[in-house]
Image (cartoon, coloured by chain):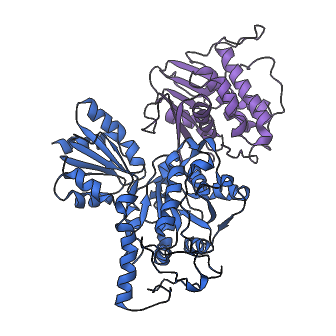
Chain colours: A purple, B blue
Amino acid sequence: MNEIRISGFGGQGIIKCGYIVGKTASLFDGKFATLTQSFGPEARGSACSAQVLVDDEPIRYPYVTTPDTVVAMSQEAYDRFGADITQDGTLLIDEDLVKSLEPPKVGKFYSIPATRIAEQLGLRLVANIVMFGFFTAMTDIITPGAAREALPSSVPARFVELNMKAFEQGYEYGLAVLGKLPDGGEEKPEETKSGANAGAGSKREAGSKKAKGKSSSGKNTGKKKATQGE
Amino acid sequence: MKADPRGVLTGAHYLDGDHAAAEGGLAAGCRFLAGYPITPSTEVAERFAARIPKVGGGVFIQMEDELASMSAILGGAWAGKKSMTVTSGPGFSLMMENLGLGIMMEVPTVIINVQRGGPSTGLPTLPGQADMMQARWGSHGDYEIIAICPSSPQEAFDYMITAFNFSEKYRVPTLVMMDECVGHMTEKVVIPPADEIELTPRKEYTGPPEEYLPYLPDKDMIPWMTKAGDGTRFHTTGLTHDEKGYPVMNADCQETLVRRLIDKIRKNADEIAIVEEEEVDGADVVLISYGISSRVAIPAIERARREGLKVGSLRLVTVWPFPETRVRELAKNVKALVIPEMNYGQIYYEIERCAAGNARTILVPHGGGWVHDVNDVYAGIKEGLK
């Protein structure tokens, strides 16, 4: 059983990210997955989290108790949920949004500038999908093939291409961090395992091949709210 | 009869309980939903509103309030459509008067209550299970009703179909008492092909129009129904009425009518009852639960079993009519019945009544807002073994 908590602030697509993880596992990886969410009236801008259980057996007790995998996409989310993780767990952060952190006592700790990558793709809103790709690479919970199958029906039709791109960027960034990129010519980013200075102004880019998308100045971001597919 | 394939989204989906309930309604043939948005139930109406244009005809209306919503679905049913509404605590309160009208007029319809913390506006986004007695007695007068408690999105789908079937079979408004946890929990939901979904058809009158009596009961105590305005003489009212549907204000008519309204459910209680049992034979303690509390109790039961304790589980899928026969039997064979529910004792008192002193009854209460701490449920089990 994997106990996953994905956290950030309302409006980032945190619940959506959890939804796609659960959908990938349960519909395309042949596992069972239960998604629950911390849900408040405050919504946009405040801390929120999605909890996903993934197991080979049907899930009876539906809640995460001690997560083995935590994703933090905001400082507040990290402060609230970053320490609440098993000792051999995996912590993933958006390194531009979680800047102040104690080196966590976890098995694995990786960071990615997910929001910056999304901005370079032209739409900050897909940061959650960049993170989803990164999550897919850094954990063995879901398979990339299943993730690619789940994604198109989970986002609005006109954004499928952009979201697939976001997924691949996050996924490749993860492979590069792990040193697993199939393309030998790729510049290998420095390891961030151990994490001591991962968040603190690390200026790494995901790879030299990244297309320089127009930077999102915020005019696109608020309005195009992704609607929930299934 | 089989389901209309146009309303059945056959396949595997990843849905929350609210969306699954909407799909269950559509699969059951519901083509009219009148409602007023309220957290945490709004997603049911949203899903229904989005889907209804694609299923070959149907209507969603956002009404001015819950009183009107409840009235509208009674009208929808009389117009020949399967109808439903959906709400949460405060809206459920507003529906109570017209729920009674539906019971009196014997209207097949389904009401979903995605329970949140109360009283009053309480906790809009957080769970509760404290409307269970309101479901039973919330409208004035004496009656019996059917209420079902799903504990997963799959069950939300499946038991919506059951709810519509009960409502047609017994001509009674049927309540689907979800809770916020189940409504907002997302899991895989498998929707079968339409030809595998068995629906109970409306008990339609097919005799000569001039001989139709809208409240003449059949041998099963259920009268035949027609579509209002479709050729037969038609009258229905909330007043005590005779077989013609006209008001008759006396004790004899009241006795005949109310007795039948109660008996048509009470005498079929065993047939209506749906329970799930696990390791009940030989158990010293049996945990009785419903809705999300059934799933929350599982780690406590497993922990007790790992310690060699004999603990069984009885899950109430239908809570009303209360599965009295089974609980009475069970109480004679165990030391204690342990009841975790998100309230300070509602179904607990029904169980205590049925236990009739044969077994101890231990309430593990929770005021709502979140689910039970597993340790509290475990402590209840230990208490039962003392």
Q: Is residue B318 left or right of residue B56?
A: left
Residue drawn at 40 percent across, 75 percent down: B261
Say which of B96 and A225 sits in front: B96
Residue B35 seen anywhere in this rendered image of the structure: no
Provide residue A92's location: percent of width, then percent of height: 58, 26
Say which of A63 and B182 sits in front: B182
Image quarter (top left, top right, bottom left or bottom right) of the N terminus of chain B? bottom right
Q: Is residue A119 above or below residue B160?
A: above
Figure disc tally: 0
Direction top: furthest residue: A184
Say which of B367 and B280 sits in front: B280
Q: Is residue A130 left or right of residue B105?
A: right
Provide residue A154's location: percent of width, then percent of height: 69, 39
Provide residue B323's location: percent of width, then percent of height: 33, 57
Q: In this view, does B168 lie above or below A190?
A: below
Direction front: furthest residue: B208
Q: Is residue A115 left or right of residue B281?
A: right
Image quarter (top left, top right, bottom left or bottom right) of the C terminus of chain B? top left
Q: In this view, does A17 lie above or below B49?
A: above
Provide residue B217's location: percent of width, then percent of height: 45, 77
Residue B32 seen anywhere in this rendered image of the structure: yes
Which quarter of the figure has residue B84? Answer: bottom right
Residue drawn at 64 percent across, 57 percent down: B48
